[in-house]
Image (cartoon, rainbow, N blue to C red):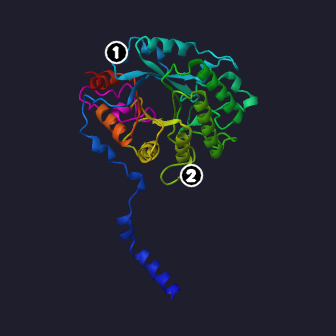
Amino acid sequence: MNRIRCLLLISYILLCPSLSSQNWKNPSERYKEAYKNYANAACPIPEDDIQHFVYFSRDRESIIDHPLLFIARFKGAQIMYSWRELEPEKGRYDFSKIKQDVNYLKGYDKKLFIQLQDVTFDKKYKAVPDYLLTKEYDGGAVLQYNDTGEPEGWVAKRWNKKVQDRFAHLLRALGKEFGELIAGINLQETAIGVSPKTAPDFTEQAYVEGVKNNMLALKKAFPNVTTMLYANFFPGEWLPFEDKGYLKSVYQYGEKIGVGLGGPDLMMTRKAQLNHALAQMHEGNFTVPLGIAVQDGNYIGKTGADNDYDEESDHIHSSRKNLVPILHAFAKDFLKIDYIFWVNQKPYFEEDVMACFQK
């Protein structure tokens, strides 16, 4: 009897595929229209509890006389500093640029938010010190590759224990020097283009553990200011279908040890971002701060990595729609964000962001 029932069930499934397909909902598209709930958002952006910073990447000179200094709602500047420039020689640190920026912003009652760089997206530039690029540290850094197999930059060997140890030394030195003088510090994104094929000593599990070790070192070095990791993607995993628990475990670990979480690129219409960092933030119940960066291209719905993105030709004139209100509303209500880092990209920051933040 059981055999007959099994044959009948198999026949039913084969004969009625349309029934199952009609009821099936693609989990990767569960948030694809969430942004529409915020379509009516408009300027000016109402007062909120979000900490708003202006992101300058490595262009620290641009903070001089910048409009953010005179707009009360901006708490300060987020600036990227490379490991290489902060530790020119092993154990010898040069924090002079950070000191200058802290003091300059302090004069306007603003604070610095450090982004610590150990990854680059330019194959001509390494962000790690020369002493790491030796046999003692297994080379210290490797090329990372884009989806087409082309080299696109360098990444520190975050999975290497010796590299992790030196990174922890840098963090301790920074924490000792600046303590509570800064608003916060974040580590760069977890997305890297590395695999065992391109780096034989790389494993997915070692990479995840390395990221967590760096998070713990960050928290220990800066126990009294906001710490954050941009956790967006992990090699070998693609949510929701290839879920190995990497990204979720990092979000859980951050909550456990008190390290905030976030990501670059506020892309509210793309499945890749929606199913990874944005889904983690939306679905989680966090006590640690959450942050999101609005980076190059995001003001027109693109990212700097898009093949069709051209910073010059993509400048849309006055007829373009100002996306800042909907970006803000989506981040505030859908993601429950505590920090937004608005990139200082022309002409969008002056024409779109400032238009929404100035009274």
Query: Which residue has dot 1 on it?
Result: 70
Q: Magenta stretch: residue 316 in it?
A: yes
Q: Magenta region, mostly helix, strand or loop?
A: loop
Name the residue rendered at 35%, 65% in the picture: 22
Label 1 vs label 2: CA separation?
A: 46 Å
Instruction: Say which amino acid is labelled 2.
Output: Lys
Q: Disc 1, disc 2: CB below 8 Å?
A: no
Task: Give the magenta part as a residue range.
Answer: 298-322
Q: Where does residue 238 sit, x and y in percent of width and height?
A: 51, 49
For label 2, the crowd category at 10 Å Cα-Cα, with few meaning under 14, some 14 to 19 and many 20 or more, is: some
Q: Secondary structure at mark 2?
A: loop
What mark, if any, has residue 244 been given in the picture? 2
Location of residue 71 with respect to 287 vertically, above or below: above
Q: Where does residue 317 sit, x and y in percent of width and height?
A: 27, 26
Q: How many marks?
A: 2
Question: Which label's residue is closer to the chain start, 1 or 2?
Answer: 1
Instruction: Choose mark 1 or mark 2, whichever is in front.
Output: 1
Q: Secondary structure at mark 1?
A: helix
Residue lying at the far bottom of the rendered structure: 1
Instruction: Say which amino acid is labelled 1.
Output: Phe
In this rendering, does residue 154 appear at all?
no
Q: In this rendered view, identify the residue nearer to me: 304 or 331.
A: 331
Q: Magenta stretch: residue 157 in it?
A: no
